[in-house]
Image (cartoon, helix red, strand yellow):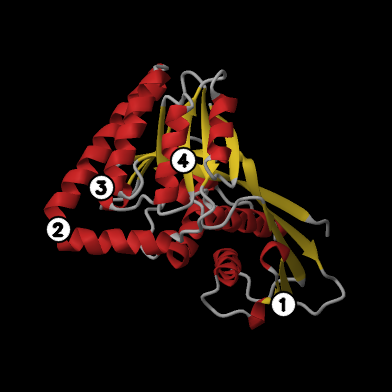
Amino acid sequence: MPAISAKAPGKIILFGEHAVVYGQPAIAVPVTQVQARAMIMAEPRLPAGSVRIQAPDIGLESWLTDLPEHNPLAMVIHQVFAKIGIDRPPALTVRIASTIPVASGLGSGAAVSVAVIRGLADFLGHRLTDEEVCALAYEVEKVHHGTPSGIDNTVIAFARPIFFQRKPEGNQIETFKVAKPFLIAVGDSGVNSPTVLTVGDVRSAWKADRERYEYLFAQVGALVQSARQAIESGTNNRLGPWMDQNHALLTEIGVSSPELERLVAAARQAGALGAKLSGGGRGGNMIALVTTETAEPVCQALRQAGANNTILTTIQ
């Protein structure tokens, strides 16, 4: 049986993080410059049911049976077996590699889940739809994020720009066309910030002052709607000021940090049309809208301001 490989991109949220957990829309896009990859290999010399997991990036090598039940990698593998209806799989090794920084807002956990789900299902002869992959990955996201919006697993499973909104009757997921490609610079603050912590803190603050936070979330939602119209009409220069406004609202919500503020200010001073934190906040990544002329100066300014790494990605 030949080895099977599957990959999944990273992601950034352009507009709407945190507010999306409370019913407001958000826009997210894939970032193909970073990826998670899963390689599934048959192990014919091992007894049936033997599943070995290798994730050298995090120093993990283990048998599936030795991992705790709620380990995210164990969960995703068990989810695939249950979906396909396999009690005793053929002996195999799942090897995982990723260039997506962990706890940085680029969707590392969801990308690994999507890559493993696709690779393992294909290896077992059951190609899953994007919707099925998305649903399985969402279950694992609950381990990573506690109360996830569902946006990470969705944009990564579909690998296209999406407009996403949680609704009681079911999530609204719409892919949409980018009328005119535009450039986004991503700056890594170098501060690991697990999304589950910021999401939990925002929920506590919302419970303590619902009226204020619902007002802030509604303002974020209005920016998302305006941004979608601009992207679909090709008036991308309008996005910059809205990114600045979204960042100001996220700061008021309480998820910025000194490192992110420094990077956002550096990007704007170097010529970015707008800049904001992206993802859970209090670390992780920020993004800036740039042109072909300002892309390199902005990336250089971000590195000088303390960014561990920069990525330039085209949204199209």
Horizontal relation, residue 248 to residue 305: left or right: left
Of the numbered discs 2 and 3, the one sitting upstream in the chain is 2
Which numbered circle lies on residue 209? 2
Lower sequence index among marks 1 and 2: 1
Residue type indicated by callout 3: Glu
Task: List x then y, in percent, for residue 185.
Answer: 53, 33
The amino acid on which the numbered mark 1 sits, given as a three-letter code, is Gly
Query: According to the image, label 4 marks what residue?
Result: 263
Counting from the top left corner in percent of width and height, residue 283 is at 45, 53
Observer-nearest of 186 and 55? 186
Earlier residue among tags 1 and 3: 1
Whether pointer 2 and pointer 4 mark residues with C-beta atoms closer than 8 Å, the reply is no
Q: Which residue is mark 1?
A: 49
| Viewer can see residue 162 | no
Of tags 4 and 1, the one toward the viewer is 4
Q: Is residue 295 left or right of residue 229?
A: right
Earlier in the chain: of badge 4 and badge 1, it is 1
Label 1, label 2: how far apart the Cα atoms are: 51 Å
Per the model, the C-alpha gap separating discs 2 and 3 is 13 Å
Q: CA distance from mark 3 to mark 4?
A: 17 Å
Label 4 SS: helix
What residue did someone put label 3 on?
A: 252
Q: Looking at the image, which residue is at 26% across and 39% down?
A: 221
Q: Amino acid at mark 2?
A: Asp
**Disc 1 crowd, CA 10 A, few/some/many (<14, 14-19, 20+):** some
Furthest-front residue in view?
304
